[in-house]
Amino acid sequence: MSKVQIYGSGQSRAARALWICHELGIDFEHKVMEMKDTKSPEFLAINPNGKMPAMVDGDLKLFESMAINSYLAQKHNKDGFWPASLADQARVTQWSFWGMTEVEKNLLTILLDMFMTPADKKNPKAVEDAQAALNKPLKVLDDSLKGRDYLLGSNFTLADLNLASIMSWAKLIRFDLSPYPNVAAWLDRCLGRASFKAARGGK
């Protein structure tokens, strides 16, 4: 049986798919890519959007990191990582979408300005607005984590992996999470997992 193939840089959203492969012990091959590679005819045949990540599993070609993770979680589920109940499956979808719509854009705005924008093109106002915009969703997340280790309760699930993969950017930009102690503790638990460190090359 051929291995699952994950296409993308470990610094891109492909990191989410690499994390789940390590978390679930999936036999996979990491096809390391640079941005220039995403426009090649070979890659466009897999992901016509020309963006990372993409996945190939047998005859299946899939793009969009959250779709890839949902597929892999259901196919290779163990220890309730993909929850059994329909209600909890819906909560996995809820938190995954919420992370993309409420958190990801603002974290990415700060990240790009901090690490990838030339000094003469930096936009302090955009960064300030993004930082302010994060306060409301982080309060929602902090309240939701009150009294529980993970988003759905005591077990680490796909909801945690997907959202923590987004929230890991808060670490990179040194975002102050002290006003949100439940978020800070949850994120440390998630990013402290051996599977996350393995996806980052053991770092």
Image (cartoon, helix red, strand yellow):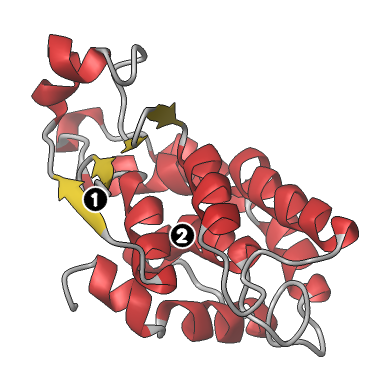
Query: Looking at this view, is 50 or 187 the one in front?
Result: 50
> Does residue 51 appear in this view?
yes
For the residue pair 3 and 118, the one nearer the viewer reads as 3
Tag 1 secondary structure: loop
Residue sitting at x 81%, y 72%: 144
Residue at x 16%, y 70% (from the top left corner):
201
Residue type beneath disc 1:
Gln
Instruction: Using a 10 Å C-alpha cutoff, classify the residue at mark 2 as few (fewer than 14 neighbours), some (14 to 19) or many (20 or more).
Output: many
Query: At 13% across and 37% down in the image, what residue appears?
Result: 33
Q: Which residue is mark 1?
A: 11
Amino acid, disc 2: Ser
Dot 2 or dot 1: first in sequence order is 1
Q: Is residue 101 left or right of residue 190?
A: right
In the depicted structure, whether residue 43 falls above or below residue 168: above
The x, y position of residue 151, in whole percent, is 72, 72
Is residue 49 left or right of 43 when viewed as pictured?
A: right
Q: Secondary structure at mark 2?
A: helix
Residue position for label 2:
165
